[in-house]
Amino acid sequence: MFHQTPARSFTLAVVLAALVAYATFGGFFAREIVIEIAILAILAISLDFVAGFGGMVSLFHGAVMGLSAYGYSVLTAKFGIHPIPAAFAGIFLAASFGAAVAAIASRTSGIFFIMATLAFGQMLYTIIFKSRWLGGDDGMGGIPRFDASWIGLDFNDSLQFAIFAVFGIAVCYGIAALLLRSAFGRTMCGIHGNEPRMRALGVSTWKHKTAAFAISSAIAGVAGVFAAQHTQYISPELLFWTVSGEVLIVVILGGLGTLVGPVLGAAIFVLLKHEVGNYTDHWHIVVGLLLIVTVMAGGRGIYGQAEHWITGRSRKARESLNA
Amino acid sequence: MSDAAFWILQLLNALQYSMLLFLLSIGLTVIFGLLHFMNLAHGALYMMGAYIGISITSATGSFWAAFFLAPLAVTAIGAVLYFTLIRRLRNAGPMNQVLVTFGLIFVFLDIVRLGWGDIALGLDAPTALQGTTKFLSVSYPTYRFFIIGLGLVVMATLMTIVSRTQIGAMIRASVENDDMAAAMGINVGRLFFAVFCVGCALAGLAGVVAAPVFSATTGMGISILIPTLIVVVIGGLGSLQGAVVGSLIVGSIETIGAAVLPGVASILIYVLLAVILVVRPAGLIPARV
């Protein structure tokens, strides 16, 4: 079950404020990092929504993000459609794909579900990789950013775009948190806890799973629109299954099922990647070992572990008061 | 090239690729069937087999030394993994298994980059197997015939062991119901470890025999993993016959499809997997009836 505790609100506020401050006072490179963090954080929120609360681990969120990025890019760069409807179209495309896969894959569970998402994600990757019209492995360029001159903003300015991206995290977090607190979110957590019982209560579980994936994929689609606008160039690499694996790593490192943990995880992951990159070329071994240690230590992640200690201590304090 | 020769060539290519997939998927599927463990790092073990094989060949000057020693070395790596991580993850649920073995993919990727560098390395086929052999009026590399033969020998051996020996009966019993097998006096833990080692050895063997054909790259472990997983799911997780059928299907679709329908072939295996997951989620030949 999801609770937006004061500690979670506080952590989210601190992380978002730190990102805004880093973008404002850092140079161009800092802003690029903040945008990178924001894209990863939104994607991590979308994955935590289904994996952390619905118990449905997916290995296709990278592909969903890429699909939305391609949808946005094709509509704007190839057909000259206005960026805002194009962004909605990209997000809608991502949501439909996510819902379709979930509708098919929700017949399976556990490792088969993971394999099914992996297969559909790779299918999408292969289709785009092979398509000459979409640029194949060369990717696509010339993608415009939103034109926000009507409210006096210029998103081609890296600082303004970075702050817009951080705003994007806040909006996506808010939507995910509201949905998790709604009856829909509670039902999803119930299905995770005990699916046969929810079915016995009269809940059509596959419809809920499909809807949950549609929502999650729409949020991943938001990340895709940001990703396409960030570098204004996209390539099929966005959709490769290891991207989805990396997002899963971010969610686990931050704290699965805490919603704010993945945001924190994304910030730490990207910063660590750039810091480690200054010393060694071998970033993968660092993140691989970190992941293994996190999972073997109980899999709570950074925020989850902190929360576990704090609630554990306060419970102990309460018990000693009662005794 | 005549029409018949074209088809024979495609068929041989498909068979050769299927045999490599079989060597990999048999380990993955049996490990899953027995240990309920999904090892995404199986492709990484294949890659280690290729690189270790190349080093052994250059140290001893003999491909055959690598052919026998590289699988042993990979088995040793597997044994270390078994005692440090895999044994503890057996009952940890699929997500933790996927995560830890995904982490292992990254670790092995960098170990190879540190030890052997980023450049693709080749390996010469042994002198006895160089050149081509005529088969039904088609000249085909002798070494690839060797891979096909090796795959068939391994296939026949495993089939015999599983269906005809006492060890095989113990394995089948444990796949069916491991608690009951343990109650009947089978040392399930030791059996699992032995099967795990055989799976790792076959992955290493696949790596070393693949090196002369494909050359070793840091991406080889990741790129072979997806077709291997598809074989395992199509065939039925934990099923030996399923791995045979699955690798023949995937190998044929990938090679013959690439020659006949170049645009669609790479998508076909994913479509097939999707259809199987919907229609027969337990695979074509399920391990448990």
Image: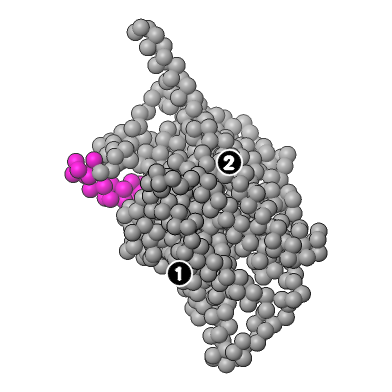
Q: Earlier in the sequence, mark 1 or mark 2?
A: 2
Residue placed most toward the observer, B274 or A62: B274
Image: magenta residue range: A197-215
Which chain hosts label 1? B
Q: What residue lies at 64% left-to-right and 48% top-to-bottom? A: B77
- Kindly state the secondary structure of the residue where label 2 is placed: helix
Residue A212 percent coordinates (x, y): 33, 46
Q: What residue lies at 24% left-to-right and 41% top-to-bottom? A: A198
Q: Is residue A203 magenta?
A: yes
Is B227 drawn above or below residue A98 in the view shown?
A: below
- Farthest residue, direction bottom: B2
Q: What residue lies at 62% left-to-right and 31% top-to-bottom? A: A25
C-alpha separation, residue under disc 1 versus residue under disc 2? 32 Å
- Kindly state the secondary structure of the residue where label 1 is placed: helix
Residue B231 percent coordinates (x, y): 47, 64
Which chain hosts label 2? B
- Residue A153 at least partly seen: no
Three-letter residue code for mark 1: Val
Residue B83 - label: 2
Residue B246 percent coordinates (x, y): 46, 67
**Residue A162 located left or right of residue B276:** right
For the C terminus of chain B, the quadrant is bottom left
Residue placed most toward the observer, B180 or B286: B180
**Residue B241 located left or right of residue B114:** left
Label 1: how many Cα within 10 Å (few below 14, some 14–19, many 20+): many
Label 2: how many Cα within 10 Å (few below 14, some 14–19, many 20+): few
Q: Nearer the viewer's eye, disc 1 or disc 2?
A: 2
Say which residue label 1 marks.
B245
Residue A177 percent coordinates (x, y): 36, 35
Most frequent secondary structure within the magenta stretch = helix
Is B127 drawn above or below residue B63 in the view shown?
A: below
